[in-house]
Amino acid sequence: MRDGVIYVAKGAGYLDLAERSAASLRAHNPGLAVDLFTDQAPLRPGLFDRVLPIPETGPTPKLACLTESRFARTLYMDCDTLVLAPFGDLFDILERFELAVTHDVRRTSALIREGHAVDTPYAFPQMNCGVMLYRTSAAMAAFLADWQRRYREAARTRDQVSFRDLVWQSDIRFYVLPPEFNLRRVTVLDAWEPLDARPTILHSHRLLQHLRGNPERLDDLPAIMVAERAARAEEWVRLGLDAPAAGADPAQPFHAAEALAGRDARPATEAVAVRVGG
């Protein structure tokens, strides 16, 4: 089959999320094939075209399943996603490229700048591997095999560390998708103008926060927007910095936050003064 989506859900909690994500996908893309790799029995029969066991051949369930897709053009999505619009011609990216992903957010943090064997420039951060578009080819098969090897060598929980190194060193033809296809920082919707973008795939850890000890379950974009706006305001307070405000230099607080974290990307002679607590 030419085009399709795969999910990987290990455990009942992630199966529940995968079924909710797949239902949103079906609502906007009713003719698209959807496969599930899982160790559970789905609770919603008929939602997935195929339900398959998770192979034990890879270092993680996800990395094991990526190589098992039956589609010529595959969209992998994490379970903590919701589809907000039709995919349109998204898969046609693979007519020119082997692989497509988006940049991760929080790019001045040590977490997103971390690599294993390679020190890449700031402008080449980690990619977010929770939404990946890739095609079946010899080049992609070699890439995925190399990713599995590097993941084992890196011994990091997050697969994005080894993925960043690999993409930097590989000759794979890849494309960086616009953020609306892997919408992580949802508060960007507060800034976009009407025709800037078409929000398509929401990908938020807020959708699985109830699996990580938070008593509140969030199931849709409006609820996540409220939570993220509050969290953004609280983070400026925790840093002891004023949030960007009307009439002030809107870039300065971001430079100050990075300098406070000890990761100023600019030469010391060009660093801006840090203004703490107003």
Image (tube, rainbow, N blue to C red):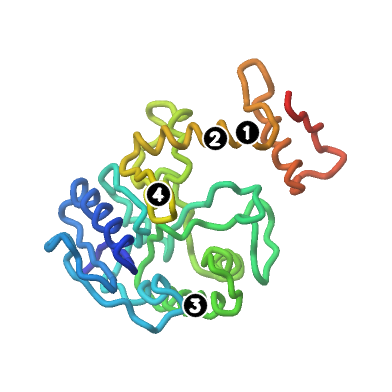
Q: Label 1, on which residue?
A: 236
Q: Which mark is residue 232?
A: 2
- Gap between marks 3 and 2 measured at Cα: 35 Å
Left or right placement of residue 119 versus residue 99 in this view: right
Closer to the camera: disc 4 or disc 3? 4
Q: Secondary structure at mark 4?
A: strand
Evaluate if marks 1 and 3 touch, with contact meaning CB atoms under 8 Å apart.
Answer: no
Q: Secondary structure at mark 1?
A: helix
Residue 171: x percent and y percent?
Answer: 55, 70
Instruction: Please tell me how crowded label 4 is: few (under 14), some (14-19), or many (20+) other residues with Cα within 10 Å.
Output: many
Instruction: Please tell me how crowded label 3 is: few (under 14), some (14-19), or many (20+) other residues with Cα within 10 Å.
Output: some
Left or right placement of residue 28 versus residue 150 in this view: left
Closer to the camera: disc 2 or disc 4? 2
- Gap between marks 1 and 3 measured at Cα: 38 Å
Residue 2: x percent and y percent?
Answer: 24, 66
Left or right placement of residue 237 versus residue 63 in this view: right
Most foreground residue, 226 or 139: 226
Query: Which quadrant of the figure has residue 113?
Result: bottom right
Identify the residue at the far top of this view.
247
Evaluate if marks 2 and 4 touch, with contact meaning CB atoms under 8 Å apart.
Answer: no
